[in-house]
Amino acid sequence: MDYSQFLIMKQEIGLLIVFLLVFLYDTFASKKATGVLPAVTCCLFAIFTALGFIPCMGIENDAFEGMYQTSATVTAIKNILNVGMLIVMIQSIKWANSEFQAIRRGEFYELLLVTLFGMYLMISSRHFLLFVIGLETASLPLAAMVAFNKNRYESHEAAVKYILTACFSSAIFLFGLSLVYGLAGSLYYREIAMMVTGSGFGAMIIVALAFVIGGVGFKLSLVPFHLWTADVYQGAPTNVTSYLSVISKGAAAFAFLVILTQAFGTLYSKAWEWMLYGLIILTITVGNLFAIRQRNMKRFLAFSSISQAGYIMLGVIADNAMGTSALMYYILVYIFSNLAAFGVIGAIENNCDKGDMTDYNGLSKTNPRLAFTMMLAMFSLAGIPPFAGFFSKFFIFTSAINQGSTAIYVLVLIALINTIISLYYYLLVVKAMYINTDGECPVGTFKSACSERLAMWICVAGIIIIGLASPIYDYLLTIG
Amino acid sequence: MDFIIPLLILAIPLFNFLLLGIGGVKMSHRLAGTIGCIGMGTVLVLSYYTAFNYFFSGNEAFIIDGVRKAATIFNVTWLEFTKNLVIKLGFLLDPISAMMLIVIPTISFMVHVYSLGYMKDEKGFQRYYAFLSLFSFSMLGLVVATNIFQMYIFWELVGASSYLLIGFFYTLPSAVSASKKAFIVTRFADLGFLIGILILSFYTQTFNFADLTNNPQNVLLSTGGATFLGGSVLTWALVLIFTGGMGKSAMMPLHIWLPDAMEGPTPVSALIHAATMVVAGVYLVARMFPLYLMEEFALQFITVVGAITALYAAIVACTQIDIKRVLAFSTISQIAFMMVSLGVARPEHHEALGYMASMFHLFTHAMFKALLFLGAGALIHAVHSNNYTAMGGLRKYMPITHWTFLIGCLAIAGIPPFSGFFSKDEILSACYSQSMFWGVWMSIVAGMTAFYMFRLYFLIFWWDTPDYSHHHHKPHDPKFAMSFPLLFLATVSVFAGFIPFGEFVTWNGHEYTIHLNTVIAVTSVVIALLGIGAAYVMYSKKNEWPARLAGLVPWLWTAAHHRFYWDEIYLFITHKIIFNGICRPIAWFDRHIIDGTMDGFAYITNKASVAIKGFQSGKVQMYVWWYLIGALLLGAITAVCWM
C-alpha cells in the first residue's frame, strides 16, 4: 500500500495534530497551566482554521481507491465548519473554566475535536464503511458531552435519550446499508450508483434508501426522526447544544447531499426526490408548529433548528450545482446566526441562570448589546433583509426553483408560508426584549466575559458582512 | 482628468455626513461646525479647480475646435441586472454640470458659515450640519450624474435630505407637517419621473445621458412611432419626466409645498429652497434638452406651465405678510422664468438663446436669492419674527443687512448693472424671439417682480418704525459669521452679470456672444422702474394707500392672500374625496377581509400546534417507535407509489 496517500488527507492530519497537542498539553501540563488550556486550544484551532484557507488545500484528489475524496467543495465546507467550531470553542471558554467544569475542560475540548474529525470523515468519505466510522466517531462522544453537566438531572436524561435513539438510528442505518450491499455488492458510492442503474429496481432498494435517509435524517433531525432533538437540546449544556445545532447539523447536511447525489443519484426522480419532498414539508411545518408554543429558549431554538434543517434540505432536493452552493452558504449563515443566539443564551445562563422567554423581558434596557445581538440573530434566522439570513434563504429557494418542476414550486411556496410562521416566533423574542419593558426585568445588567463577547462580535460581523459581501457567495457558486 | 478630485468632491460631504451623524453626539457645537465648514470649504476649492479646469484648460477632452464636450470622468457599474439594464454611477463634466459645481459649493459653503452664527446654541446643531453635508452630497451627485437613473437616485436623496432639514425643528407641529407635505408632494411628482424613466429606457434600452442626447433622432426612431392616448410615447415620457421636475421646482399645481417649506431654518431655505434643490427641475430639462427639442408639444407644455406659474406666484407674492413666504413665492416665480426660457428655446432662434439665458438666470438667481434669504435670516434673527409687521425702519439699525438686501432686490428687479438685469434680459429676448405673446406676458411678470420685491424692501427698512424698546436689545447687524456671506454674495450679485455666459454654457457647446437687445433692455428697465416707483409711492412712508387699494378689489386681495386657495383645494380632494371615497372602503377591506384571513390562518396554525403536541411525549420508547414507523412508511409509500 502506498502510505503517501495519507498526505492527501491534509485537513484530517492537521486536526489530528491539534487534537494530539491539546491532549498532550492536558495530560502533562501543570495544574496551573491547564487553566489556559481552552485559550490555547482556541489559538491552535484558529491557526489550523486559517491554514485551511490556503488555496492548495482545495485541489481535487482521492485516496484509498476512492474511499476518500477531497475537492474545493469539500475543503470549503470543512472550512465553514472550522469557523463555526472556532466560535463554539471561544464561546465555551468561560463555561469550561467555571469552577464545576474546570476539572473536565480538557476532555470537553478533546471530545469536540474528535467529533469534528468524525464529521470530516463523513464529508470526505466515498465509501459507506468509512462513512459509518465517521458517523459513529461524531455521534458517540457527543453523548458524553451532552451529559457534561454532571450535577444536573436533565443533562443525564438528555444523554440517555440521545444515546438510545442514536443507537437505534445506527441500527436502522446499518440495516439499510446491508440491504444496499446485498443489492449492489459494493459499498463504494460510485459502484452503488452504477449497480443501481444496471439492475432492475425493486422495493428492496426503496426500503434500503428509506433506512439510509432515516439514519442520516437522525443527525439532521428531520421529522419524524427528530423527536430526540428538543429534549437533548434543552438538557445539554448550552455550548454543547449550540455545537449540536450547527456544526453537527451542517456536516450531516453536506454528507447527506453527497450520499444522495453520488450513491443514489440515479434514483432522484424515482424515489428520493419524493421522499425528501415529504420530509421537508413535515420538517419545516412540524418544527414551526412546535416552535411557536415553546417558552424555554433552548427548546425553542431546538424546534427552530429543526425547521431550519428543512430549509437546508431544499438545497439537496434542488439537485443542481447551485443547490450545493446555496446549501453551503445557508450552513455558513446559519452557523453565525444560530451561534449568535446561543451566545446570548449561554451568557445569560452563565451569569443569571435564566433561560425562559419571559426572562428576556426588558433585556434591551438592562443589556442593550446582548439584546441587539439576539435581535440580529433572530432577524437573520427569520430571513429579514439586509441580514445574511435573507440572502441564504433567497439563494436556497432560487436553487430549488431552478430545478423547474411544478411540484417544487409548490414546495417552495409551502416553505415561504412557513417563513411567515417562523417570523412570528422569532419576533416573539424580539418583542420580549424590546417591547415588554414595562414590568420587571428578570435579567439584571451584567458584563459578559471577554471570550463570550469576542464570539458574539464575530457572529454579529458575520451576520452583517456575509449578507453584503457578494464575493463569498460568488466563490461558493464557482465551486458548487 | 484625474478621477481623484471629482471623487473627493462627492466623498467628502458623504464622509462628513457619516462622521457628524454618527459621532456628532459626542462633539461640541464648535467642533461639529468647524468640521462641516472645513469639509465644505475643501469641496469648494476642489470644485472650483475642476470647473476652471473644464472651462479654461483647453484640454482636448473638454473642448475641441471651440466646441465644449461632455467628458465622463469615471463611470463604474453599480448594478448589472441584464446586459442592457445596467445602473452605473459616474461623474459627468459638461458646461452645465461644471457651472453647477460652482453654484452649489459656493452657496453651500456660505450657508455653512452663516449657520455657525444663525444656528448657534440650537439643539441638534451637529445633526443640522450632518444633514447639510448629506444635502450637499446628494445635490452634487445629482448634477454630475452620467445617467438618468443615477440622477433619480440622487434626486430622491435630495428630497429626503430636504425633508430632514425642513423638519429640523421636529417639535414644532407646523415644521413636521411642512416636511411631510414637501416629501409627499415631491414624491408624488417623482412617481411621474420614474414612469417617464421607465418608458424612455424601455424603448431606448439605455439610461445614459450621452446615448440619449447625442442622437435624439435615434431615440425618436427607437420608439417606432408608438403612441398612447393620442400622444407619442416619447412625448409621454418627456412630459412625465418633466412632472418630476415640476415637483422639485415647485411649478403649478405642485408648488404648494415650497411656501410651507419655509418652516425650516432660514439658511436651509437659502440653500435648498432658493438656490439649489428647487432648480433641479430646470437642470433636469436642460440636461435632456436635445430630447425635448424632438417633441414640440413637451416644450410648449413647459412654456405654458412656467408662464402661468410665474404670473400666479408674482400675484401671490404681493400679498404675503411673512417675509420668507414672499421670498418663497418670488423663488417660484423666478424658477418659472427659467422654465419658460427653456420652453421657448429653439436652435433656429439665436442658437437656442433661451437655454443659455435659463442657465445664466439659474446662476445669478442662486446668488441673489441666497443673499435675500440670508438677509431675511439676519432680520428674523434681529426682531424674532417672520412678519414684516414687526419690522420697519430697520435701515438705521442694520446698515449691512440693509445695503446687501437692497442689492439683492435691485438684482432680482433687473436694474442694471446688477446681475439679474443681464440674465432676465436674455430670457425676455428669448421669449420675444419665440412669440410676442409670451414676451409681453413675461415682461409684465418682471414688472410685478420689481414691485413686490420693493414692497418688501420698503416695508422692512422704511415704512414706520415700531417700538423696539421692549426687545432685550435694539435690532443690530449680525456678527461676522453671518455678515460675511451677505457681503460676499452681494459682491457676486453686483458683478456676476458681466460674465460672458454665452462663451461657457450653450446648448450645443458652441460659443455664443451675448448681444443686449437695446429695445427689450430699455423696456424692461422702464417697467422695473415703474414697479419700484409704485412700491415707493405706496410703501416708503406709513400711509393708507395700501389698505385702500386692497379695499378696491377685496375678493382679489383675499384670494391672493390665501394663495388662491390651492391648499384648500388639495385638502378637499384628499380628505373629502380620496379619504372617503377610496381609503375607507380599502381600510374596511383591509381590516375585515385581509386581517380576518390572517387571523384565521393564525388560529388554524395555533390549533394545529396544540393538536400535535402529544407527538413530543418525552418518552424515549415512543420516539424510537415513531422513528421506525416513519422510516417504514417512507419506504412503503414511495414503493407503492412507484410500483
Image (cartoon, coloured by chain):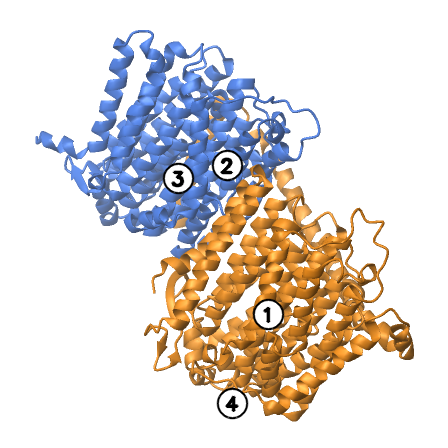
| Residue type, numbered disc 4 | His
Occupied quadrant, residue B363: bottom right
Using a 10 Å C-alpha cutoff, classify the residue at mark 3 as few (fewer than 14 neighbours), some (14 to 19) or many (20 or more). Answer: many
Figure check: B133 above or below B411:
above
Residue at image position (46%, 47%) is A393
In the rendered structure, find residue A355 and report the number of the disc placed on it. Answer: none
Dot 2 corresponds to which residue? A377
Of marks 3 and 1, the one in the foreground: 1
What chain is the blue one? A
In the rendered structure, find residue A331 and report the number of the disc placed on it. Answer: 3
Dot 1 corresponds to which residue? B493
Of marks 4 and 1, the one in the foreground: 1
Q: Where residue B478 appears, x then y in whole percent?
A: 68, 53
Figure check: B419 above or below B17:
below
Q: Nearer the viewer, residue B162 or A251?
A: B162
| Residue type, numbered disc 1 | Ser
Instruction: For mark 1, name the chain.
Output: B
Return the disc, 3 or 2, that comes first in the chain's sequence.
3
Using a 10 Å C-alpha cutoff, classify the residue at mark 4 as few (fewer than 14 neighbours), some (14 to 19) or many (20 or more). Answer: some
Separation (CA) of disc 2 from disc 1: 58 Å
> Does residue B640 appear in this view?
no
**Discs 3 and 1 share one subunit:** no
Secondary element type, mark 3: helix
Q: What colour has chain B?
A: orange
